[in-house]
């Protein structure tokens, strides 16, 4: 699967052990650390840099074994600081305050891959790249003692190459789960199996629900609101930079518009878009909405996500 990192999307790695905080602080659900080390230093300040939509590769070290890449997830929300201690803090017990970064879509690898093998196999390239402050020592011989480290794009590309060589696909778990759902529903309808986007099958996130309510289920394009027999309104939330592994968009207000099913389909398939003047663009110049203004204005819509949709999805 090709990976296109978004303009503002960064990659990090978590190096940890299987004891990871316990309930509400679990591995794959949160990154966490004390905010200050014993002598008041900012050892874990990197956690404050993580943004929604960033990618986190996870590495686990089981007792008596070396580090292994085991899965990948996306950052769900910004880093918060809390004074409550994790249920099972392990060696980070008794600190005054903790950083906590929520994750989503944790997707375990089909098999764990040895970090040491990666370092050995790519040693020459890693030494040539001479990247400091990442997850291995300068001589690329072993992992360094960091909890979270940044992974620059060049290094991420090498990791992808290593994963692919070992038949590990990032986010395959989500893909399989999702295709499974599609296959089942299409069988029920007797329709042939068609590969659809993930976007439609992920359940509404809390932010989508909130936006639907805020904008009264009205479509951003046509302004229509569908009323169901029970009197409730119906609309669909659309992530401009899709959440799926190909686009890895963030689940934030700025990236979501509310649409009717028709315009949702048109957005998904790149038939319609919104340009930088907040005007509607349609691939059919005669479409009634081509060149029209939006049905209502949205101050909290992110220009970078409209732009992303126009550049990577519209008319593709
Ligand atoms: Zn509409």
Image (tube, rainbow, N blue to C red):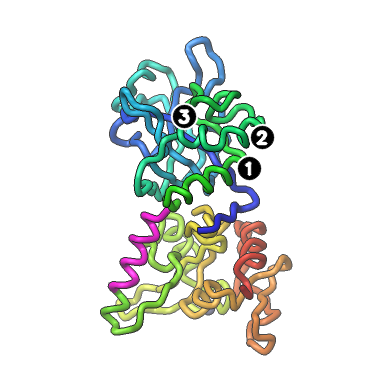
- Of the pair 117 and 80, the residue shown nearer to us: 117
Mark sitting earlier along the chain (1/2) = 2
Separation (CA) of disc 1 from disc 2: 8 Å
Q: Are marks 3 and 2 in contact (CB under 8 Å)?
A: no
Mark 3 CB near ligand 1 (8 Å cut): no
Q: Is residue 109 above or below residue 297?
A: above
Tell which tag, 1 or 2, sits nearer the viewer.
2
Mark 1, ligand 1, within 8 Å: the answer is no
Which of the marked residues, 3 or 2, is nearer the chain's N terminus? 3
Q: Where does the C terminus fall, quadrant-wise?
A: bottom right
Give me the residue at 56% from left, 58% from top: 255
Which of the 4 quarters of the picture holds residue 233? bottom left
Who's the residue at 53% across and 43% down the image? 159
Mark 1, Cα crowd under 10 Å, few <14 / some 14-19 / many 20+, is: few
Q: Quadrant of residue 202?
A: bottom left
What residue lies at 43% left-to-right and 79% top-to-bottom?
226
Q: Nearer the viewer, residue 258 or 112?
A: 112
Judge whether residue 205 is colored magenta. Answer: no
Q: Position of residue 141 (x, y in %)?
A: 52, 25
Among the two numbered marks 3 and 1 on one chain, the one whose residue lies closer to the N terminus = 3
Horizontal side, residue 271 vs residue 163: left or right: right
In the image, taking residue 41 as reference, residue 26 lies left or right, namely left
Residue designated by label 2: 129
The residue that label 1 is drawn on is: 154
Front residue of this view, candidates 229 and 264: 264
Residue tagged by mark 3? 99
Q: Secondary structure at mark 1?
A: helix
Q: Which residues are magenta?
A: 171-184
Q: CA distance from mark 3 to mark 1?
A: 28 Å
Quarter of the image for residue 205 reads: bottom left
């Amino acid at each position: 699967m090709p990976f296109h990192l978004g303009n503002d999307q960064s990659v990090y790695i978590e190096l940890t052990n299987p004891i990871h905080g316990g309930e509400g602080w679990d591995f794959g659900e949160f990154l966490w650390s004390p905010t200050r080390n014993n002598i008041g230093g900012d050892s874990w300040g990197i956690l404050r840099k993580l943004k929604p939509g960033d990618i986190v590769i996870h590495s686990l070290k089981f007792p008596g074994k070396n580090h292994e890449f085991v899965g990948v997830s996306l950052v769900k929300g910004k880093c918060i600081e809390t004074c409550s201690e994790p249920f099972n803090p392990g060696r980070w017990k008794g600190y005054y305050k903790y950083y906590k970064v929520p994750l989503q879509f944790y997707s375990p690898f089909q098999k764990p891959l040895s970090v040491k093998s990666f370092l050995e196999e790519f040693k020459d390239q890693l030494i040539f790249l001479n990247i400091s402050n990442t997850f291995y020592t300068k001589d690329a011989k072993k992992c360094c003692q960091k909890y979270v480290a940044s992974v620059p794009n060049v290094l991420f590309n090498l990791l992808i190459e290593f994963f692919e060589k070992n038949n590990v696909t990032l986010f395959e778990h989500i893909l399989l789960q999702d295709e499974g759902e599609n296959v089942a529903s299409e069988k029920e309808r007797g329709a042939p199996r068609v590969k659809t986007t993930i976007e439609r099958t992920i359940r509404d996130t809390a932010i989508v629900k909130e936006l639907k309510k805020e904008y009264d289920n009205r479509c951003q394009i046509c302004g229509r609101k569908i009323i169901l027999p029970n009197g409730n309104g119906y609309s669909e939330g659309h992530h401009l930079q899709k959440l799926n592994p190909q686009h890895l968009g963030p689940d934030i207000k700025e990236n979501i518009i509310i649409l009717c099913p028709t315009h949702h389909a048109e957005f998904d398939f790149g038939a319609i878009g919104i340009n930088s003047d907040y005007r509607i663009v349609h691939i059919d110049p005669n479409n009634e909405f081509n060149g029209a203004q939006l049905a209502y204005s949205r101050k909290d819509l992110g220009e970078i996500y409209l732009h992303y949709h126009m550049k990577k999805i519209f008319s593709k």
